[in-house]
Image (cartoon, rainbow, N blue to C red):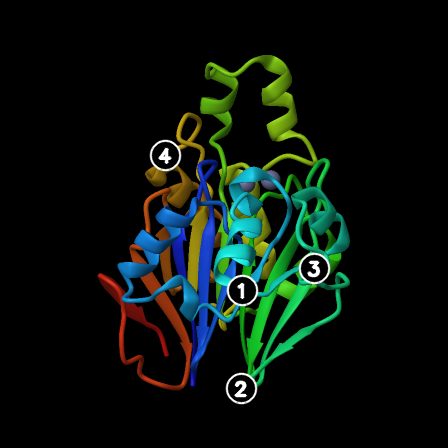
Amino acid sequence: MSLSFTHLGTGSRGNATLLECGDMKLLIDQGFSGRELEKRLARMELKVSDINALLITHHHTDHGSGASLTQRRWDIPVFCNDRTAAALNLDLAKVKIFENLEALNFADDLALLPIPVPHSGADNVAFIASHRGERGAVLTDLGSWTDELVNHVSGCQHISVEANYDNTRLWNGPYPMKLKERISGRGGHLSNHQTGEFLSKVVNQNTRSVVLTHLSQKNNAPHLAESTVLYHIDEVFEGDIRVSLQDGPEFTHHIGQEEPEKVPREGITLR
Ligand SMILES: [Zn+2]
Ligand SMILES: [Zn+2]
């Protein structure tokens, strides 16, 4: 059975990532309207009611604004830590609160481990999905990283990580100085250069796919993100690198043994 990762869209206007393992379908983050989520899943021939659980990284609007609606309208269990649940006003009787660093176990030997990441004013987590020896990481919205995070992401077969801004574009761009300082601070977002540096610590010969996510539309461009990151990892990384933009889904990455039966518009199988 393979593990697959499909970004339905990433960026400051909404994030959601579909994780599939056999019949199990999990959504990481829901920052879209209900209709928008329906539309994006329909491109993969899926309905919202096909989703088994929703996991939220942190409460910011672009990650959690659709959580309460998804919980109420489709009765889908929502998993998050207590600070995120409180900030999102979720129905606490129905929400499944997790502790950071305690694995969440789903059917078919699928487990997700939430790892705390530094992000101002939020109790944000990265998720490491594991299934029978295969591991994939989904992490976004972090101004810096910890040794703990490096240890957990090291050697993952698949890594989705934000590459939020290009340094030159941010500092020469239109944002007010205070905002520029917040974005580039320890609790803000990763620049392309920082993402490259982080990946150079965690990518090894096991890593087969990297997806760069959450690019700023004002302060970044796909070719800048990709070339800056490749500069840092080119010598060790021989896999597939892609950029996920705001309008998805555009591609799926599979890790594991089995040939996938169905892929969206442009599928990639990595074995
Ligand atoms: Zn975000
Ligand atoms: Zn955030």
Secondary-structure class at tag 1: loop
The answer to whether the residue bearing label 1 lies less than 8 angstroms from the nearest atom of ligand 1 is: no
- Given this view, does label 2 or label 4 mark the residue nearer the observer? 2
Above or below residue 107? Residue 82 is above
Q: Is residue 193 left or right of residue 80?
A: left
Quarter of the picture for ligand 1? top right
Q: Which residue is mark 2?
A: 108
Which one is earlier in the sequence, the residue at label 2 or at label 1?
A: 1
Which one is earlier in the sequence, the residue at label 2 or at label 4?
A: 2
Secondary-structure class at tag 2: loop
Residue at (27% x, 75% y) in the render: 262
Q: Which mark is residue 76?
A: 1
Query: Where, quadrant-wise, is the N terminus in this rendering?
Result: bottom left
Q: Which residue is mark 4?
A: 221
Q: Which mark is residue 115?
A: 3
Q: Is residue 151 left or right of residue 213?
A: right
- The Cα atoms of the two marked residues, 2 and 4, are separated by 38 Å
- Comparing 13 with 139, the one in front is 13
- The Cα atoms of the two marked residues, 2 and 1, are separated by 19 Å
